[in-house]
Each structure stands twice: as C-alpha cells, then as structure tokens.
C-alpha cells in the first residue's frame, strides 16, 4: 500500500487478494467467483481425490511459521497421491482462522501456498474460509489423475509379496522431538524435515508399473504397513533390523520401536511380488529414491515386528486421532 489508500477488507477481499492468484488462471476455478469448481473429464484417466486436515496443537505447534504450515499441508496430500501413482493438478482449501491469525499471518500462509503451488504445478480450485474461537485448522483436498483402472490400492498385496519402504524412517519422530527440545538440532535439519516433508512424487510411475499395494507413511511405519496387510487380508512381518532409520533415531529397541510408530515421515511403504521387487528397487533408484526390502506378507492376519530375530511389541503401532 502507498499514499494512504484504503484496501478492501473482509473474507471476500482476502479471497480476491490472497487466493485468486493461486488459481494461476485455471479455468475450472472460475476465478473463485462461484461457490464451486467445475472440472472437465479426462479420457483414459481416473480422478483420484485425497484430503488431510492439520490442527494447531495436534499436527503442528503454535509457533510453527504459517508459510511452512501451508507448504506442509500441500505436501502431506501430495504424498498420498504419490502412493496411488497419481499426478496432482489442483486442490480445494479450507481454513478455520483462529483469533491470533491477523492479516500478516494470512498473507504468510498464502505465500507458502503460492511457493509450493508453483513448485509442484498445482492450482487452487476453490474452498472455504471461516473463523473460529478455537485453534487454527487448515485442510486441503487434492485432485490428481491416474491412468484408468491402475491406481495403486492398499489392498492389492498377495501372500509372498515383499514389503519395501522408501528413504529413511523416523525423520518426523526425530524432528518433533527436536522442536520440543528433546533432541539436539544445531543445524535445524531435523526441524526442517518435520516442517517440510518431501513427497515421493518421483515414485509414482514406478509404483504404477511394479507395486501391488502402497500407502504413504503418515501414521507410522508399523501402522501404515499394517493398513496394507489389513486391506489385503494378510499377515505381515517387518524386520526392524532392515529398516533404514534416520541417524537421529537411537539404535536401541525402544528408540527404533518409537520411531517406527512415530509417523510424519511421508515416505512410501509398498508391496511387490518377489519377481518384481528388484525391478521396483532399480526403478526407484533411477528416479533418485532408495527403496529397502524390510519384510514380507503371508497368509493370516496381524503385524509382527522383529528386532534381532525376536518379536518386539510397542505400546502403539502409530498415530491415532482417537
């Protein structure tokens, strides 16, 4: 602002000023002047939708910067689409602003959306904004395309399939503890990993080609791998000695179990037939992502984790909202 001009204020002024630019001219967004978006069909593709909500004090800390919060919101949803083999193109946004969120806070949030909207080539298509006397809550529903009938489901594994995980496990667990002052983080690397996870978009195509089932690791490795087993009607054994834990994770049994149940890693856990596992690992390596074989599916039900060849149990398998 210059010259002392008055700027329009209020919900619709915010939408026009902060969010209309995030549509990047996408026709289906209708310049955010309507109360709905309209999307043309795409022959040969299925529309894949996913949604996540982040609540202050539950999914992020009150002093987390709002630009990185916005980026994390998009990235956790992009992670879900990557696990399905889908390519994102747009999103719907819901914001419930707490009383502490002034104009500068809303501008910072919109700037974070703009940054990752450009980085990941996704457009804002619409949404809703409200205020609340409670904690800040933000949600996004991402939309993506996947070739017809080829989405990688949780429930596609078969007995004998191998279990694989991308990257390193325990980053989110360690990052949260660094933010809480429980782990040293002199360079801020753990905090960065917690605030800005990297969705494994490079794996989407190789998952479509070789994986029988997949999910992202948001609730914890044991829990999310267990979701694959449950959806597939199988039992699962995870060898924690083979899991690639982040260097900040303690090497004792308690530390590894805690990290394997910690969540917020946004890696991909997937299944592949024994004959396809090597090709899946090689294809991921070509895409710049390490995949590690950490277990196997078999007949039955339940998840069994081992460490040093012996079964181990944890008080909880992963994050739950209830």
Image: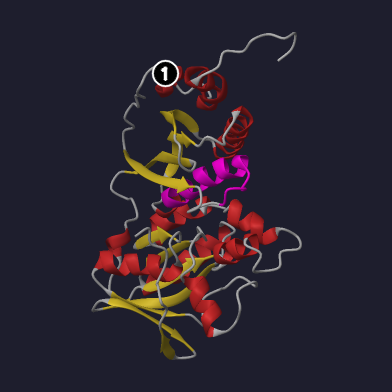
Position of residue 37 measured from the top left corner of the image (x, y, whole percent): 36, 24
Residue 91 seen in render: no
Please identify the quarter of the rendering in which residue 28 is found. Answer: top left
Please identify the quarter of the rendering in which residue 139 is found. Answer: top left
Split into 4 quadrants, where in the image is the C terminus? bottom left
Task: Check the image and report above or below for 186 versus 32.
Answer: below
Position of residue 136 measured from the top left corner of the image (x, y, whole percent): 49, 41
Q: Is residue 13 or residue 198 the one in the foreground?
A: 13
Split into 4 quadrants, where in the image is the N terminus? top right
Q: Main secondary structure of the magenta part?
A: helix
* Residue on which the image places disc 1: 30
Is residue 209 shown in magenta? no
Q: Is residue 253 or residue 60 the one in the foreground?
A: 60
For this view, does 38 lie left or right of residue 220? Answer: left
Magenta range is 61-81
Residue 268 seen in render: yes
The residue depicted at 44 percent of the width and 43 percent of the height is: 87
Q: Is residue 213 or residue 314 the one in the foreground?
A: 314
Colouring style: secondary structure
Position of residue 182 measured from the top left corner of the image (x, y, whole percent): 64, 68
Q: Is residue 95 or residue 241 the one in the foreground?
A: 95
Position of residue 93 measured from the top left corner of the image (x, y, whole percent): 44, 34
The residue depicted at 54 percent of the width and 47 percent of the height is: 72
The residue depicted at 34 percent of the width and 43 percent of the height is: 48
Density class for disc 1 (Cα within 10 Å; few <14, some 14-19, many ≥20) is some
Q: Look at the numbered disc 1 and give the secondary structure of its residue.
A: helix
Is residue 76 shown in magenta? yes
């Amino acid at each position: 602002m210059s010259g002392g001009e008055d700027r329009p204020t209020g919900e619709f002024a915010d939408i026009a000023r902060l969010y209309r630019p995030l549509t990047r001219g996408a026709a289906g967004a209708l310049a955010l002047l309507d109360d709905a978006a309209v999307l043309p069909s795409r022959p040969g593709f299925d529309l894949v939708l996913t949604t996540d909500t982040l609540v202050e004090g539950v999914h992020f800390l009150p002093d987390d910067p709002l630009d990185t919060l916005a980026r994390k919101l998009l990235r956790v949803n992009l992670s879900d689409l990557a696990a399905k083999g889908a390519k994102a193109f747009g999103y719907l946004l819901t914001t419930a602003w707490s009383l502490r969120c002034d104009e500068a806070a809303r501008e910072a949030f919109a700037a974070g959306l703009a940054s990752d909207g450009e980085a990941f080539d996704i457009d804002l298509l619409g949404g809703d904004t409200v205020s609340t006397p409670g904690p800040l809550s933000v949600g996004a529903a991402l939309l993506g395309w996947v070739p017809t009938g080829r989405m990688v489901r949780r429930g596609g594994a078969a007995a004998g399939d191998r279990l694989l995980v991308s990257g390193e496990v325990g980053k989110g667990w360690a990052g949260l503890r660094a933010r809480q002052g429980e782990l040293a983080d002199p360079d801020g690397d753990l905090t960065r990993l917690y605030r800005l996870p990297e969705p494994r978009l490079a794996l989407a195509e190789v998952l479509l080609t070789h994986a029988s089932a997949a999910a992202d690791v948001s609730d914890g490795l044991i829990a999310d791998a267990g979701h694959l087993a449950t959806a597939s009607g199988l039992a699962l054994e995870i060898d924690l000695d083979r899991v690639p834990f982040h260097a900040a994770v303690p090497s004792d049994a308690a530390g590894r179990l805690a990290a394997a149940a910690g969540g917020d890693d946004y890696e991909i856990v997937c299944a592949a037939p024994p004959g396809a596992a090597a090709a899946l690992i090689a294809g991921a390596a070509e895409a710049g992502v390490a995949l590690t074989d950490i277990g196997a599916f078999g007949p039955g039900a339940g998840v069994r984790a081992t460490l040093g060849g012996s079964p181990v149990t944890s008080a909880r398998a992963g994050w739950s909202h209830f």
